[in-house]
Amino acid sequence: MSAEELVARHQPTLDAALAAIRTREYFSAYPESPSPRVYGESAAPAGQAAFDAWLGQDFPLEIPGADGRIATERSPYGPDLGVRYPRITADGLDALLSSARDAMPSWREAGPAVRSAVCVEVLARLHARVFALANAVQHTTGQAFVMAFQAGGTHALDRALEAIAYAHEEQNRTPATAYWEKPAGKGEPLRMTKTFHIVPRGVALVIGCNTFPTWNSWPGLFGSLATGNAVVVKPHPHAVLPLAITVQTAREVLSELGFDPNLVTLAAEDPADRLAQDLAVRPEVKIIDFTGSSEFGSWLEDNARQAVVYTEKSGVNTVVVDSTDDFAGMCRNLAFSVSLYTGQMCTAPQSIFVPREGIGTDEGHKSFAEVGAGIATAVEKLLADDGRAVEVLGAVVNAGVLGRLDAASSHGEVVLASRALQHPAWPEATVRTPTIVALDAGDTEVYSAECFGPVSYLIATDSTEASIALLRDTVSDHGGMTASVYSADEKVVQAAEQAAMDAGVALSVNLTGGVFVNQSAAFSDYHGTGANPAANAALIDGAFVAQRFRIMQSRRHA
Amino acid sequence: MSAEELVARHQPTLDAALAAIRTREYFSAYPESPSPRVYGESAAPAGQAAFDAWLGQDFPLEIPGADGRIATERSPYGPDLGVRYPRITADGLDALLSSARDAMPSWREAGPAVRSAVCVEVLARLHARVFALANAVQHTTGQAFVMAFQAGGTHALDRALEAIAYAHEEQNRTPATAYWEKPAGKGEPLRMTKTFHIVPRGVALVIGCNTFPTWNSWPGLFGSLATGNAVVVKPHPHAVLPLAITVQTAREVLSELGFDPNLVTLAAEDPADRLAQDLAVRPEVKIIDFTGSSEFGSWLEDNARQAVVYTEKSGVNTVVVDSTDDFAGMCRNLAFSVSLYTGQMCTAPQSIFVPREGIGTDEGHKSFAEVGAGIATAVEKLLADDGRAVEVLGAVVNAGVLGRLDAASSHGEVVLASRALQHPAWPEATVRTPTIVALDAGDTEVYSAECFGPVSYLIATDSTEASIALLRDTVSDHGGMTASVYSADEKVVQAAEQAAMDAGVALSVNLTGGVFVNQSAAFSDYHGTGANPAANAALIDGAFVAQRFRIMQSRRHA
């Protein structure tokens, strides 16, 4: 297929995405339902078979600079995956990064239109493998299958397409050429022709996380690739497979179209090597996208000074409960939010501020304890049936989460105790329901730190005014990916919105139905703001792509 | 005047600017000729009178946190200006920055359209004072009057308008509101309304330079102001007046329109206070725009970690001479480029690489010495008449320039000696013609450092290929704001363009007429690339404005 044909083929998808980022109305290019009615009867078993075939094998991928193979993954559902990837060590970085740099000139010359089309083609191929990907995401992150299919598959594809659309638009803001004619009084005008080249920054490094290896990595990966950079993907050692599939697919497409596959490489490591630290400060690396701990994110910001660094770190997500005209809906909504994927989402609510005198509701006054009981009961109902519960909870991703969960009960009064579940299909899976612990507003040392996992705090405050002040202060000082407010009083909502603006966090208002504060819809919701300590960038706005390339002009007399 | 009326009044100007940044064709909103036929007979004398009236007086400006007054300016043409500004010291920063922060909420609420219109109104008022401004620029920078009028007045206004246009467009890429309806199979769709707030980063700090106090400061100033931030302007102590006029004008407009004038403040200092260092690391300061030395620019990048930092530092501008079919035109063009404003431009050529075997021209083969002689003779002709020469040269801005000029002759063989001129109107002015010194390609330690001022090196290389390699290496390692190539061979031009792309510098090709490598036209030419050590940003692209604000969304059920 020629480049022109590829551009023509994907133009409708790209145009639809470009329209969506202008309106931020609902749009999705990749159906989120894994139903056979959508994907056909054979898609799910074929994806399962593809996944099974990788287990215990060398993953079919060769990477410059690799030294042998390494397997580092164990499913949160139990089994070791045993998939062996080309291992990169510090000794291999020269070869790896040279190959990445050498791949760039022809990619730069291809121009934005071709690069966008190639990137959308990669997404199409990943979409064709979405069931295999979903298995890979499930068995590296612990997400339940449907969530892995959506958050790790189709929704991640939408976010990737959004990044490509922003990159495409950003590059096309400058014309490829311009004719410049300046009047010169009675004399001949000055006449120049100008050429504007889009020049990539260099090698981009994407550092993946354990819980959302695709959703959080693809925007940076495709944002950098679409703007002409080569990309080295350094996966989390416990979540390599989804990104290995990604890299393999990208390399396949690039090769078929006559580009150098080393534009996209995988740097799988032995975790003891701490390869990300070595990679991040290499002079060839000019862009870094990172999702993970505040500690390493801040280290990157402080040390990888040769690069533009985009970080999503940790934060404390807050909920202000003032009043509601749908108490049952509020409790159901919060119950789902704290349960989904065992609270292992950077967007899950953690601190729920409730006036100690209680709140007004459609069911009359509810005391602080009754609010806690309402949410706790909703969680219990949601997760009453083990078989259905595991489809919400998934599995606990690692021992750190368990440790924090076990320690949580010592921080305050347990409103809802965590319960261990037996997974019907995966007996070795660690499955836990969330806990809710009551605190007082004075317990700042407890609730001002992120407690990643299924732990929520119900925090008694002096008033809603005090709750809103705590939202502002907590987010400003400790960061936050989400915030939400429940109030039947528009003035309170407005005050919360002002506080959210001051603190720089997105706000969800009175969610009582089928939308949850954890969820961030591609093309419409911004994920993060870049305005508080939890993240220095947002998915996805102009700022997320504008620094991934530079414009180099050339001019001469016409 | 209401905000709506103001928006309507300036919409045509803004629309024209928005169109220009899309095409990058010729556009200017502010006539560059100071002729009475354009500006009327009274404009020049009125501007002169306004300037004279400030001399030796308290400048009419009150700034929160100021402690007394300070005068720090002496004209490069001789006289002390004696203009006294409100003095800010470290003790005044709390009050100054509090006033800036307090001014922001209503400015944020005004929204992008009103902010853009207010900013364009400030430009209109500055344009009305352009003759006073031109005098202020002339007598702080040493630029000749017409250059001060253009580079310091109308061209700077165009660059400011360009920044406002980019900021306007960037903010308008996201709609103010969106309706989101997600299909839900057979059930009711999910329906949300979403609001997207443009939220400024905080206080923006603009650190001005001595040579281009307006042209280099206004893009950051107006880019930050248009996106909702408050701006503290810290002028160079030797070039306060042009920015004091700017701040006064902005405050006047803001007050008239009901906004807090403390959105724009001036931080004039005693140079011994080194106030920029204190200001730059204040937590309130979230954006910094700096033009000046690499030393302080790098310090800012390393230390002002709480802020987004845009720096234009120093670099080495290179010319590759391979061949030409207009030898006389080439020599004339280079002569003007090295003479204009005594070489005190960050864009002036410094290193002219010529093959030691000479070059082919329309006048036959020219030896290395003949190329040097050609340029030297062209400089002598251009500057033969003292009265005309000073209109090109202006005055030497400070003793540092003189010192470097005096030292230059020791570096190599003097091809053209500098000459001291007597300014016909300003006997105390220090006026010098440029020097050209011949070096060998091996003298890297000399020509790899910026020698700011009227010093050019004619550097003998082994070949044009070697010259192009030196262009690539010099710019990559030491930075460069401009580069140019002279060649009658398109293959050589292409090779130079590749090298310029690799090094990340703008290239001018075969300039032999009335366009000079030093010149960067607003709306068309990018000034800097952000891709080499001379600057980490470009004037003006999307990246220059995208980080000056954040988007904060709020969503609720529809």
Image (tube, coloured by chain):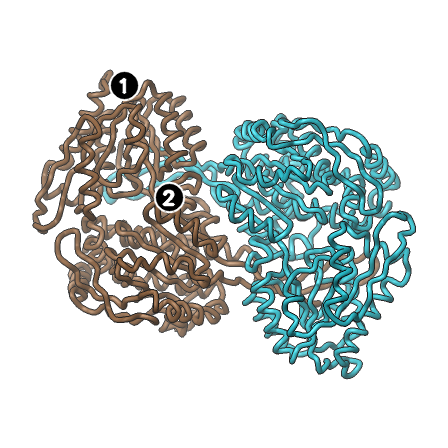
Chain colours: A brown, B cyan
| Most foreground residue, A359 or A266 | A266
Residue type for callout 1: Arg
Among numbered discs 2 and 1, the one appearing first in the sequence: 1
The residue under the point 10% across, 42% down is A421
Q: Position of residue A150 (x, y in %)?
A: 26, 50
Q: Position of residue B317 (x, y in %)?
A: 66, 63
Which type of secondary structure does the marked residue at label 1 adopt? loop
| Most foreground residue, A255 or A263 | A263
Which chain letter matches label 1? Answer: A
The residue under the point 71% across, 78% down is B323
Res B428 visible: yes
Tell me, for residue A527, which label it has, or none. Answer: 2
Q: Position of residue A165 (x, y in %)?
A: 43, 54
Tell me, for residue A356, which label it has, or none. Answer: 1
In the rendered view, does A58 fall on the left or right side of B96?
left
Residue type for callout 2: His
Res B172 visible: no
Up/down of A451 relative to B30, above or below: above
Which chain letter matches label 2? Answer: A
